[in-house]
Amino acid sequence: MISFFFLCEKIESMKKILDDDLAYAILSIVSEVPEGKVVTFGQIAKMIGREQNSRLVGKVLSNASYYGDYPCHRVVNHNGRLAPSFARQEELLRSEGVMLKENNCVDLKKYQWRID
């Protein structure tokens, strides 16, 4: 069982990394991903000038509901793999016309959002 003190300490340490401006920078990119397209955690990290922080992007997205309603289901890893803890991600992507390959990954050549 996690102690309340440990949890508070963990939240405080994350606040040093995750400020609201950073969260909104990430979420503003996610909000622009068109329906039927996906973007990777690494792409978003690069767009915000933090190329080495794709996991940070994932952390923000896991808490996106605190900031509003964002299409986080359109974000996948660099191989097109879906988030294991996001049960509805496949359903939401399929409803937008994104089909998965046999290995249950998104075909990034076909569906990846490319910014010109």
Image (cartoon, rainbow, N blue to C red):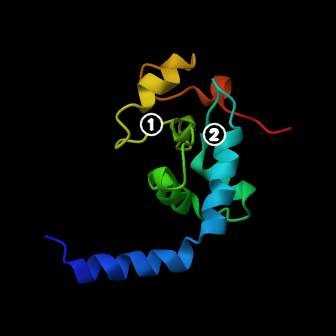
Between 66 and 9, the residue placed more toward the observer is 66
Question: Which quadrant of the structure image shows residue 87?
Answer: top left
Mark 1 and mark 2 residues within 8 Å of each other at the beta carbon: no
Assess disc 2: are there few (<14), some (14-19) or many (≥20) residues with their C-alpha within 10 Å of its C-alpha: many
Residue 42 in sight from this viewpoint: yes
Circle number at residue 39: 2
User: Amino acid under label 2?
Assistant: Val
Q: Earlier in the sequence, mark 1 or mark 2?
A: 2
Considering the image in quadrants, where does the C terminus appear? top right
Relative side of 76 to 110, left or right: left
For the image shown, how many numbered marks are present on the structure?
Answer: 2
Element marked by disc 2: strand
Spot occupied by residue 90 in the image (x, y as percentages of width and height): 43, 27
Residue linked to disc 1: 82
In this rendering, is residue 6 above or below 20?
Answer: below
Residue 103 point in image, percent of width and height = 41, 25
